[in-house]
Image (cartoon, rainbow, N blue to C red):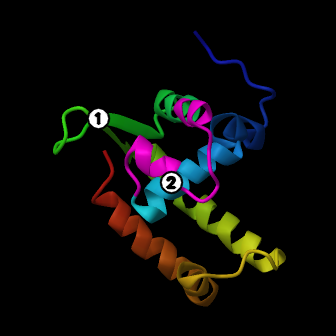
């Protein structure tokens, strides 16, 4: 069954996949903060509700952004990892971070943000190489 989109605009089609704040924050957590499990996502400072987290994880898995697998160390736990499709969002996530720090005084640059300001292309290259080792 083909998915219905709002329009054929590439921006709109992209937003249909990852365009809500919770999905992007989950992607950020996997990509940049090394979070892998449901319980780790619940500890993020944005305080996502458990029902929303379950929904967004399912959507990201259905969209082939994340893969859900049984943990190698705890068979009763699931872990999530990025697919190549998910890892390809890295430059977008970095641009959003940079834009947010540039235009919002309430969002100061932390260590990664300072690195991005100095050498955005270098940071993207370095993080892309690290993600390649983790991508499923």
- The answer to which quarter of the image holds residue 14 is top right
Quarter containing the C terminus: top left
User: Residue 69 has which mark?
Assistant: 1
User: Residue 43 has which mark?
Assistant: 2
Residue 13 at x, y percent in the picture: 71, 35
Residue at horizontal 68 percent and vertical 74 percent from the top: 98
Q: Label 2: state its secondary structure.
A: loop
Check disc 2: other Cα within 10 Å, few if <14, some if 14-19, many if 20+.
few
Q: Is residue 43 above or below residue 97?
A: above
Label 2 vs 1, first from the N-terminus? 2
Residue 40 at x, y percent in the picture: 43, 51
- Whether residue 114 is visible here, answered yes or no, is yes
C-alpha separation, residue under disc 2 versus residue under disc 1? 20 Å
Check disc 1: other Cα within 10 Å, few if <14, some if 14-19, many if 20+.
few
Q: Label 1: state its secondary structure.
A: strand
Residue at horizontal 30 percent and vertical 55 percent from the top: 134
Magenta highlight range = 35-54
Q: Is residue 16 above or below residue 133?
A: above
């Amino acid at each position: 069954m083909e998915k219905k989109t709002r329009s054929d605009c590439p921006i709109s089609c992209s937003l249909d996949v990852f365009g809500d704040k919770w999905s992007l924050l989950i992607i950020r957590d996997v990509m940049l903060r090394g979070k892998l499990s449901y319980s780790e996502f619940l500890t993020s400072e944005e305080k996502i509700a458990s029902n929303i987290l379950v929904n967004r994880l399912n959507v990201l898995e259905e969209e082939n952004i994340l893969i859900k697998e049984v943990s190698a160390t705890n068979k009763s736990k699931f872990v999530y990892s990025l697919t190549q499709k998910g890892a390809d969002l890295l430059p977008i996530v970095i641009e959003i971070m940079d834009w947010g720090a540039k235009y919002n005084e309430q969002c100061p640059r932390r260590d990664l943000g300072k690195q991005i300001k100095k050498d955005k292309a270098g940071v993207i290259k370095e993080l892309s190489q690290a993600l390649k080792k983790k991508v499923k």
